[in-house]
Image: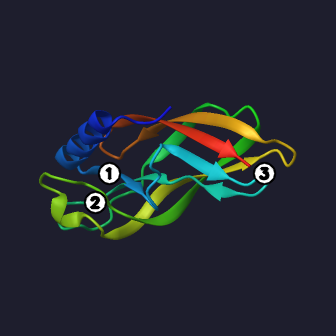
Amino acid sequence: MPISELTTLGLILLCGALGGCVTSGDKVTDGIDRAVAGEPTFMQQTYMTMDTRCRQVKRPTAVLTQKPQHGSVRMLTRKAAAVYGPGPYAHCDGKVGKALAFEYTSAPDYRGRDSFEVRVRYSDGEIRHGRYEIEVR
């Protein structure tokens, strides 16, 4: 399920207002991550927090709320560039920090769509929900 432009804008504005950030690697234009069957693949969307001086703040934590049907997920720390957009944290855009990342691995013989959902908690208590759609080839 692709994320609409309005939803993306809303997330960017919320991110800028609170200091918690959803980051991204290479742009995924249709909101679907691509994975090769049986190979570990980092999902593009990650989560991090910086203070107003763009210094790393405690990395968010997460729980898997819906497991993938055809694979497994690991939660790891990975470097990512902040994406805050307009607002008080805009000057932090592009700053690299340690982010909460998700690594998906499908069953070796599976090809097709899979997905999983997470609940992310920031150190200030803010909760966000994420859904990942994966196309396994």
User: Going 62% across and 51% down the picture, which residue do you hit?
Assistant: 34
Residue assigned mark 3? 37
Q: Earlier in the sequence, mark 1 or mark 2?
A: 1
Q: Are marks 3 and 1 in contact (CB under 8 Å)?
A: no
> Toward which corner of the image does residue 134 lie, by quadrant?
top right
Q: Are marks 2 and 3 in contact (CB under 8 Å)?
A: no
Residue assigned mark 1? 21
Q: Are marks 1 and 2 in contact (CB under 8 Å)?
A: yes
Q: Nearer the viewer, mark 2 or mark 3?
A: 3
Q: Is residue 40 above or below residue 115?
A: below
User: Going 30% across and 68% down the picture, which residue do you hit?
Assistant: 94
Q: Disc 1 on helix, strand or loop?
A: strand
Q: Amino acid at mark 2?
A: Met
User: Going 18% across and 57% down the picture, which residue do you hit?
Assistant: 89
Q: Amino acid at mark 1?
A: Cys
Q: Disc 3 on helix, strand or loop?
A: loop
Q: Amino acid at mark 3?
A: Ala
Q: Earlier in the sequence, mark 3 or mark 1?
A: 1
- Circle on res. 71: none
Q: Is residue 55 above or below residue 49?
A: below
Q: Position of residue 116 (x, y in %)?
A: 60, 35
Q: CA distance from mark 1 to mark 2?
A: 8 Å
Q: Position of residue 72 (x, y in %)?
A: 72, 43
Horizontal side of residue 10 vs 65, given as left or right: left
Q: Position of residue 15 (x, y in %)?
A: 26, 46
Q: Nearer the viewer, mark 1 or mark 2?
A: 1
Residue assigned mark 2? 50
